């Protein structure tokens, strides 16, 4: 009886276990079915998007949309000069930007996925579309035309990612601004405590009790310790005036604290230090602005007109170069869409062609056999380098074509037709085949503002060879021949600044280290006369080097021989150099007395004036 009950109980448990297992199996099957249906629905939504996203992602994409595209060149493909180390700064910038991308977006072949804005679009012959895009955080010179096969994400995804990145950047900016403001306040409080400990501003002591009453003339004099700088007054005297009759102890109210922080921030535009009775001020280094003199409306109009490149590649001699900017070429050279893939240029005459066959026919039939060099006069020859001076009035077509070609690599350039008042200096490499241009610069025949260079360009195929610095040095050698001082036309472009800053620094440091006998009596005017660099450019460069000080309203160069040697190693004079003995050139004759940029019209230094007085006294 007991065994029968036990068997019945086991059978009952087995049946319940089978029911539970069947229930779990059914539930699992239902769950898997629901998951499969959900995945299938999501897949259908991705394949068949909503009407709103479908209209946005349908070709052609709207101008102004954001998409993701493949950027870069594969290492397996043939690498040209423009994908190698010809522009180390751009490569370094791209590497830094690649670090911020996810790992799955940076391929081992050098191809990355980047967000870009659609600027323009054109249909192709096979019914597809091509898009002109601008990569975010890249210079305009990197803009290019792309095909559909390079697009990774449509506008619906690209716009969402762009909005998310914008919110993230704004949040980061607010955080950094808050941290910077806190750090500045802490630094200013440290300055207050330091001045209090040295006795310049004692805590809990009214200013009028600490200092005697000054006359009106003394107060006026103390207000302008450094008159050449706005708001660059003596910090001590300004504090005394602002705090008259008030207590400035660290235990003051919050309003007094912020007032003190604001007061010191406005009076510390230049770093000032008080040494004894002297106030030493360091002028803050200024940055040049390539858009100086252009308002926002002019900049928008310029970018709107020149936003789309009309030439993809320029073939000059044996080099094919990727262009950077728009150029207003004659319409005969462009297609119906206003675009040409490759512009072929004769390197000897700068005539332009849209087909390679036309260039070959021109060079074989119409190009003179003895004209394998630029027109004009050869004024310099040293080794394989030669310089030609071309008058814009005598060779209008050549100079105009040169300006058209230069605009492909320069953003702000307006000289195309009026070339008569300009001289063009074309630098060439010489070999058995002839004279091959590598760069040029232009200058006005007579400049009312003392410009010795208007436009400068080294072709990208010959950059990183020192030719840009050579052209700058050559312009100053001609200025020395004219016995003048000169400066490049302002405002300068970003690439112009990168070329001029190293030249000014190396030239001035080399002069101070090797050409100055009595360093205690050298003046900025003496440096200007010897180097032909304009005084304002010398002051700017000395600020960049951090060796220009002002002591009681007088400029001083604070640099000993050790510091100059360190600067000379950091900013060396590089090759190729201009050999003045190989220059055969005669300047235009001008009236020296009326030319304010002539060296002879400059005031002599104090040492020279004393020497002239002594010589006159001895002769008398």
Image (cartoon, rainbow, N blue to C red):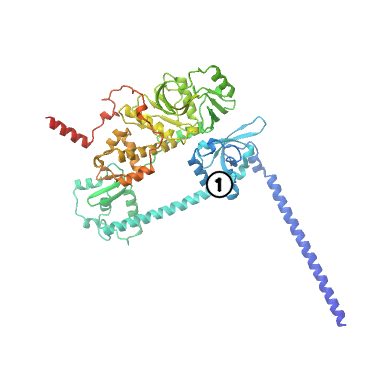
Which of the 4 quarters of the picture holds residue 60? top right
Q: Secondary structure at mark 1?
A: helix
Percent from the top left, x then y, of residue 417?
A: 45, 23
Q: Work out whether residue 559 can be spotted.
A: no
Q: Which residue is mark 1?
A: 163
- Given the current orientation, which residue lies at the most extreme bottom position? 1
- Given the current orientation, which residue lies at the most extreme left position? 620
Badge 1: how crowded within 10 Å, few (<14), some, or many (20+)? few
* Side of 42 relative to 311 (left or right): right
Q: Residue drawn 53% across and 35% down?
A: 81
Give 475 or 190, whichever is nearer the viewer.
Answer: 475
* Side of 406 relative to 14 (left or right): left
Give 127 or 574, whichever is nearer the viewer.
Answer: 574
Residue 373, compared with residue 81, is above or below; it is above
Q: Work out whether residue 345 can be spotted.
A: yes
Which of the 4 quarters of the picture holds residue 594? top left
Give 348 or 599, whichever is nearer the viewer.
Answer: 348
Percent from the top left, x then y, of residue 205?
A: 25, 60
Quarter of the image with the C terminus in it: top left
Percent from the top left, x then y, of residue 230?
A: 31, 43
* Side of 197 relative to 465 (left or right): left
Total labels: the figure holds 1
Quarter of the image with the N terminus in it: bottom right
Give 286 or 445, whichever is nearer the viewer.
Answer: 445
Q: Residue drawn 34% across and 44% down?
A: 565
* Side of 562 relative to 214 (left or right): right
Percent from the top left, x then y, of residue 139?
A: 50, 39
């Amino acid at each position: 009886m007991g065994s029968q009950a036990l068997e019945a109980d086991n059978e009952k448990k087995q049946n319940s276990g089978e029911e539970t297992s069947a229930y779990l199996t059914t539930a699992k099957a239902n769950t898997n079915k629901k998951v499969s249906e959900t995945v299938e629905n999501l897949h259908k939504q991705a394949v068949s998007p909503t009407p709103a996203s479908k209209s946005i992602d349908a070709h052609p994409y709207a101008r102004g949309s954001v998409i993701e595209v493949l950027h870069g060149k594969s290492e397996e493909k043939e690498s040209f000069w423009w994908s190698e180390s010809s522009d180390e700064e751009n490569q370094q910038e791209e590497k830094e930007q690649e670090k911020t991308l996810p790992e799955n977006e940076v391929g081992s072949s050098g191809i990355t996925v980047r967000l870009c804005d659609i600027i323009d679009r054109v249909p192709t012959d096979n019914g597809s579309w091509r898009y002109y895009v601008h990569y975010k955080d890249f210079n305009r010179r990197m803009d290019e035309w792309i095909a559909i096969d390079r697009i990774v994400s449509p506008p619906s995804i690209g716009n969402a990612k762009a909005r998310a990145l914008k919110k993230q950047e704004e949040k980061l900016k607010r955080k950094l601004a808050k941290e910077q403001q806190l750090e500045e306040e802490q630094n200013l409080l440290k300055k207050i405590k330091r001045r209090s400990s040295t006795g310049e501003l004692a805590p809990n002591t009214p200013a009028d009790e600490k200092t005697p009453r000054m006359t009106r003339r003394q107060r006026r004099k103390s207000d302008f310790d450094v008159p050449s700088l706005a708001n660059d007054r003596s910090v001590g005297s300004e504090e005394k005036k602002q705090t008259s009759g008030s207590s400035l102890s660290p235990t003051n109210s919050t309003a007094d604290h912020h007032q003190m922080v604001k007061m010191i921030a406005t009076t510390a535009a230049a770093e000032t230090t008080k040494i004894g009775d002297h106030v030493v001020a360091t002028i803050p280094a200024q940055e040049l602005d390539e858009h100086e003199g252009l308002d926002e409306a002019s900049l928008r109009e310029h970018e709107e007109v020149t936003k789309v490149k009309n030439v993809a590649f320029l073939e000059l001699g044996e080099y094919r170069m990727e262009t950077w900017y728009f150029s207003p070429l004659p319409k005969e050279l462009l297609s119906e869409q206003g675009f040409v893939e490759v512009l072929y240029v004769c390197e000897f005459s700068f005539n332009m062609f849209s087909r390679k066959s036309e260039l070959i026919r021109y060079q074989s039939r119409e190009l003179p056999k003895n004209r394998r060099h630029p027109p004009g006069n050869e004024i310099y020859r040293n080794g394989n380098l030669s310089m030609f001076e071309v008058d814009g009035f005598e060779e209008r077509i050549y100079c105009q074509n040169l300006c058209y070609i230069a605009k492909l690599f320069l953003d702000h350039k307006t000289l195309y037709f009026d070339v008569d008042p300009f001289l063009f200096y074309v630098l060439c490499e010489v070999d058995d085949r002839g004279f091959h241009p590598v760069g040029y610069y232009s200058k006005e025949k007579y400049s009312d503002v003392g410009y010795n260079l208007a436009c400068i360009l080294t072709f990208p195929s010959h950059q990183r060879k020192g030719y840009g610095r050579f052209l700058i040095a050559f312009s100053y050698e001609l200025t020395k021949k004219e016995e003048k001082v000169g400066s490049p036309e302002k405002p300068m472009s970003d690439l112009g600044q990168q070329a001029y800053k190293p030249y000014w620094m190396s030239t001035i440091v080399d002069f101070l280290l090797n050409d100055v006998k009595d360093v205690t009596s050298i003046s900025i005017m003496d440096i200007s006369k010897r180097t032909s660099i304009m005084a304002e450019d010398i002051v700017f460069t000395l600020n960049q080097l951090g060796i220009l000080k002002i002591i009681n309203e007088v400029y001083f160069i604070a640099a000993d021989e050790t510091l100059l040697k360190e600067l000379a190693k950091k900013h060396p004079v590089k090759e190729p150099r201009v050999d003045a003995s190989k220059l055969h050139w005669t300047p235009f004759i001008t009236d020296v007395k009326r030319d304010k940029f002539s060296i002879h019209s400059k005031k002599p230094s104090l040492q020279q004036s004393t020497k002239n007085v002594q010589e006159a006294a001895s002769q008398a």
